[in-house]
Amino acid sequence: MADKIIRIGTRDSELALWQAHTVEKKLNDLGYKTQIIAVKSQGDILLDKPLYELGITGIFTKTLDIAMINGEIDIAVHSMKDVPTALPKGIVQAAVLERANSLDILVHKGNLDFLNESATIATGSLRRQAQWLNKYPNHKVVDLRGNVNTRMQKLNDNDWSGAVFAAAGLERINLKPENYINLDWMIPAPAQGAMVVVAMENDNFALDALTQLNDIETEIVTYIERQFLRTLEGGCTAPIGSLVKYNDEEDTLHFQGVLFSLDGKIKIEIDKIVPIEEWKKLGFNMALEVLKNGGAELMKSIKESLKK
């Protein structure tokens, strides 16, 4: 059994491969043999349509799910924020690695005067779009798709004032430029900055190996954030953000969650500090508060708008 090779499935972008190699090194250090198998996902191929128009949650993970179910790979490594809150039958979350930077950042071209004027900002995320328009209603937001390298190139090639990226992705592949600002007012996507490894639920060899990579604090806070998302029924497309931070001195969790209208004009937010003991249903309870506070009607109108 020691000679068994764990086949690691990944998308073929530079960032996805970096993530896969990170997991590979950790497994190799524990004495496991590995092989990386890269595949192209539908989300990487269909770059001419906004993600929400494709109508598929998990468009970046589906290809790897199928490869795993078909026995072509043993495990898959993902940016956790891209993974649907409900995994396909037979596939389980096997490890969550320690979270990196969870912030969104604005990459710009060296001059920030546009923040006080009219401007065009690029992002493929409805969450980022809604939060940007909420803060800068006189700006225009355009769709930006592709892996981080492609998006950075598109920013350079167009006359946009800036584009929004996840800090962690750019930091991981040393692509974070000098011209950026931290958007600490923007609530990130649930589980942003975290990497997750999934495996088949009956593959005890892979599951035993991956258990050793799991970071319990990151597992808990991302569980809460994703439970919030799942309860709001956001899939990967609604303008929903959440962030949970653990305070080990006080043994408390700081929960922040937001739901926006697509144009950013309506904002429903929640911000609470609770004892750690409440973690199991915290995301669920926070989402219920949002739904009671006008969120149910807002989610309904978002879904109707996205169908058109």
Image: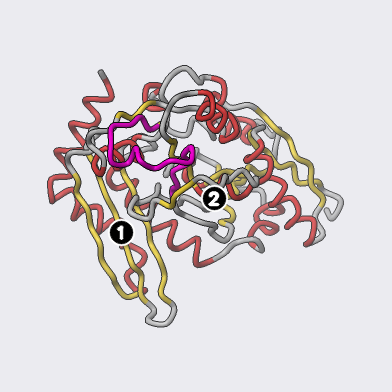
The extreme right residue here reads 3
Looking at the picture, tell me which residue is in the foreground, 207 or 96: 96
What is the tally of numbered marks visible in this picture? 2
Could you tell me the amino acid type at mark 1? Gln
Neighbours of disc 2 within 10 Å: few (<14), some (14-19), many (20+):
many
Relative placement, left or right, of 216 versus 301 is: right
Looking at the picture, tell me which residue is in the foreground, 27 or 267: 267
Considering the image in quadrants, where does the C terminus appear? top left
Q: Position of residue 68 (x, y in %)?
A: 64, 36
Q: Position of residue 22 (x, y in %)?
A: 70, 51
Q: Name the residue tied to disc 2.
A: 168
Looking at the picture, tell me which residue is in the foreground, 12 or 168: 168
The correct choice, above or below, for 107 with respect to 41 in the image is below
Q: Name the residue tied to disc 1.
A: 256
Residues in magenta, as a range: 104-121
Q: What residue appears at the point 54 percent right and 57 percent down from the top-left corner?
A: 100
Q: Where is residue 26 in the image (x, y as percent from the top left)?
A: 73, 57
User: Given this view, does label 2 or label 1 mark the residue nearer the observer?
Assistant: 2
Q: What element carries label 2?
A: helix
The CA distance from mark 2 to mark 1 is 19 Å
The extreme bottom residue here reads 249
Could you tell me the amino acid type at mark 2? Ala
Neighbours of disc 1 within 10 Å: few (<14), some (14-19), many (20+):
many
Relative placement, left or right, of 252 versus 136 is: right
Looking at the picture, tell me which residue is in the foreground, 100 or 90: 100
Q: What residue appears at the point 38 percent right and 33 percent down from the top-left corner?
A: 121
